[in-house]
Image: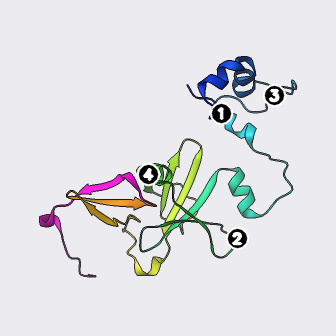
Amino acid sequence: MRRLGLPKARRRAFPGVFARWGHSESWPDGTPKPFRGKEAWKNWINWDAPFREESDELNRQRKFFWEVDDKGALWRIELCEMGRFGQMKHPKVVDDLFSHLQRNRTGEFPSFPFVSLKTHEHYYVRWANPTARLAREVPIVFNDFRDGYLVHLVDQGLAKSLSTCFDPRALRLTPEG
């Protein structure tokens, strides 16, 4: 089991430190951790930070917001600020997000019709240009064709969950085009 993203040799050199710090009920100085069990992830959030904007509070709650543009790029956005704050280019992260994508039935943020639920994090997703889309359209864009499969490439990496066998007989044209 990997803890704290450190190589096994390094964890072996300091076994007590990493086991005690990462999984105990108190911090190294003896201060008890306020959250336990499934809520233990909250121990790593600085709840007393002076930042009180809506986006800061949502980040502390592990709620993040994304837009998908017409070319399939995934862009991070903040609710209280206009504009985009970076494109997600890591294929594994994009793959994980889209492999857990579902309709947003949380009752929160109705302007984001999709949500990707992963452990305690909520990734709300919408089209960057929603007026050009039907409400039922899932924000998935295939941007390459390889060996008979429609695939999604991200910065030269492949998002594996975003691939499907291409069958020309299954193509349908809707009244909207």
Question: Of the residues shown, which amino acid type is indicated by label 2?
Answer: Cys
User: Between disc 4 and disc 3, whose residue precedes?
Assistant: 3
Q: Identify the image quadrant of residue 131.
A: bottom left
Give how far across and how far down residue 83 sits, in percent: 63, 75
- The segment highlighted magenta reads 156-177
Q: According to the image, label 1 marks what residue?
A: 4
Q: According to the image, label 2 marks what residue?
A: 80
Instruction: Report the residue at 34% width, 67% height from top.
Output: 143
Q: Identify the image quadrant of residue 13.
A: top right
User: Between disc 4 and disc 1, whose residue precedes?
Assistant: 1
Q: CA distance from mark 2 to mark 1?
A: 32 Å
Where disc 2 sits, the SS reads: loop
Instruction: Report the residue at 41% width, 50% height from top.
Output: 99
User: Between disc 2 and disc 4, whose residue precedes?
Assistant: 2
Q: Is 156 positioned to the left or the right of 23 in the image?
A: left
Q: Is 160 positioned to the left or the right of 64 in the image?
A: left
Q: Which mark is residue 95?
A: 4
Where disc 3 sits, the SS reads: loop
Give how far across and how far down residue 160 sits, in percent: 36, 50
Mark 2 neighbour class, 10 Å CA radius: few under 14, some 14 to 19, many 20 or more: few
Of badges 1 and 3, the one in the foreground is 1
Q: According to the image, label 3 marks what residue?
A: 27
The correct choice, above or below, for 37 with respect to 92 in the image is above
Question: Of the residues shown, which amino acid type is indicated by label 4?
Answer: Asp
